[in-house]
Amino acid sequence: MSPLAHRITGNPDGPPLFLLNGGLMTMAAWEKIAAPLEDAFRIVRCDFRGQLFSPGVPEPRLEPHAEDLVTLLDALGIERIHAAGTSFGALVALRLASLHPERVASVIAITATEKVTPELWAASALVRDACLETVAGGDGGRVYDLVIPATYSPEYREVNAATLALYRRQVGLLPAAWYTGLAPIIGVLEGLDLTPYLPLIQAPTLVVAGERDTMFPLEHSRALAAGIPGARLEIVPGGSHGLIIEQPEKTVEILRGFVGSLT
């Protein structure tokens, strides 16, 4: 299987730092975080299988996505990475670290969860179903409408209303194949329980929580950090699920400080 679509920037002699997408992201969304870190790190971004630049229909499980990362690492000749992911990307990073501890130097899990309860899944199921309806000819903008309130704070949505409206139109114009790939990515969350795997993570781990995250509320970040040996928890005041978009400077500070302390 061919490696994931990816982009490499930054210091070629720096430690490899992978920035792993949330479910509806593409690698371009990391730009405000990647650019300030390029002096110190070899930055690698990728789209997971099923996302915009790595098309396909993935299995609705985390493990194949983790194996896709191993394939990419092998293709790039990279032995170990610092794996920083947000939301879905954080879940993949955690599973990668439990399956292949020799490939992961550290994990930074941003706005993540230790498990997806039926209550949490209910909201994601609506998004998954909206993807399938779009494939059948429905309005793709409905997917965006369901995701945005759970991702961004009310203040951010108000200030950026015009930009978000533009993004909604752009999402609505994406081909059906994108929604076909997105549905199983969201489907990963159904019944997901990482708690049996967390004790297997050997890499230094930082769990970054948004104080106001409504998609994966704070108690889940606390449980995630408690389940990983030696993990640290950092709570960002006022942080939403879309922390990396709303507070890129804070995200850069956290990444530089944590990874820098290990290298």
Image: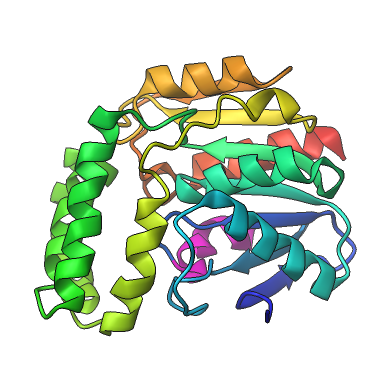
Residue 157: percent from left, percent from top: 18, 49
Residue 100, percent across and down? 79, 46
Rendered view: 263 above or below 50? above
* Mark count: 0
Q: Does any portion of residue 38 appear in the rendered image?
A: no
Q: Can residue 47 be spotted in the picture?
A: yes
Residue at left offset 9%, top offset 73%: 139
| Residue at figure coordinates x 14%, y 69% from the top left | 133
Prevailing secondary structure of the magenta residues: helix
Q: Is residue 42 left or right of residue 113?
A: right
Residue 12 vs 60, above or below: the answer is below
On-image quarter of the N terminus: bottom right
182 or 259: which is nearer to us?
182
215 lies left or right of 245: left
> What residue is shown at x 36% (from left), y 53% (from top)?
187
Residue 253 found in image quarter: top right
Quarter location, residue 254: top right
* Location of residue 103 in the rendering, given as x and y in whole percent from the top left corner: 83, 49
Q: Nearer the viewer, residue 71 or 238?
A: 71
Give how far across and how far down residue 225 sits, in percent.
58, 20
Residue 185 is covered by the magenta coloring? no
Which of 164/226 is in front? Answer: 226
Bounds of the magenta span?
26-37
